[in-house]
Image: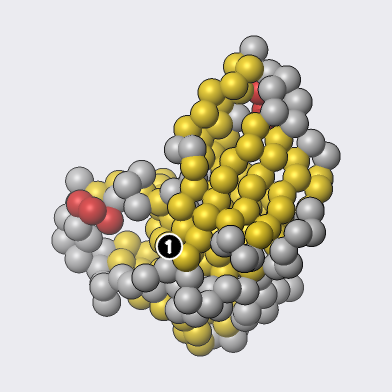
Amino acid sequence: EDKVVQSPLSLVVHEGDTVTLNCSYEVTNFRSLLWYKQEKKAPTFLFMLTSSGIEKKSGRLSSILDKKELFSILNITATQTGDSAIYLCAVDTGTASKLTFGTGTRLQVTL
Amino acid sequence: KAGVTQTPRYLIKTRGQQVTLSCSPISGHRSVSWYQQTPGQGLQFLFEYFSETQRNKGNFPGRFSGRQFSNSRSEMNVSTLELGDSALYLCASSLAWGADTQYFGPGTRLTVL
């Protein structure tokens, strides 16, 4: 059975800290790995990763994929209270389960 | 460009009833996927429609069904509701079948009493 595991489950940091969120996966077929941010309702797309070792960057957020070790990390530098959200990792297996999601990491950034 | 829209945003039903949820994808997007999100199970894939045809289906009972219209709008139906069907139902659209990036709507919060 395809599986995506995220850690930690939750995290509380102070504004200005740097955080690293982890996503590991075991799937029978891999097409891509996606990161989403979910604040209230709709998950919003952050990154899509398909190749190992190529960092994707958007402002203070960056992500990288290791297809050999089957994991990805999402880094957020200089965190702000607006970064508080659930961060979801999903793997596109290209099969009936289309996107297999992890249960998410709940990040809370305090002043 | 308008995002994915879902209606209604909230629904309260009782056990045994049926419900229909609606999703309008981003203009130009032809693939619509449905997901169920619960605190215990996270986001789980229900099904995907493209060109009015179901292309993929997740591991949900036959009480969950859907369809897609020629304008790419999609509906999802759940019959004989159970308490465990209480969840946030999210719809996501993508350009085409097999496209990796999916854009999510705000969801429909269904409560079954």
Count every numbered label the image shows and give the total.
Answer: 1
The answer to which of A2 and B72 lies nearer the viewer is A2
The answer to which of A34 and B3 lies nearer the viewer is A34
Identity of the residue drawn at 62% across and 80% down = B97
Q: Position of residue A7 (x, y in %)?
A: 49, 42
The answer to which of B91 and A65 lies nearer the viewer is A65
Q: Is residue B87 left or right of residue A6?
A: left
Quarter location, residue A33: bottom right
Q: Which residue is mark 1?
A: A3
Where's the N terminus of chain A, which quadrant? bottom left
Q: Position of residue B63 (x, y in %)?
A: 26, 72
Identity of the residue drawn at 55% across and 31% down = A107
> Is residue A10 visible in this depiction of the protein?
yes
Coloration of the structure image: secondary structure
Q: Position of residue A103 (x, y in %)?
A: 44, 49
Looking at this view, name the residue that lies furthest to the left: B16
Tag 1, which secondary structure?
A: strand
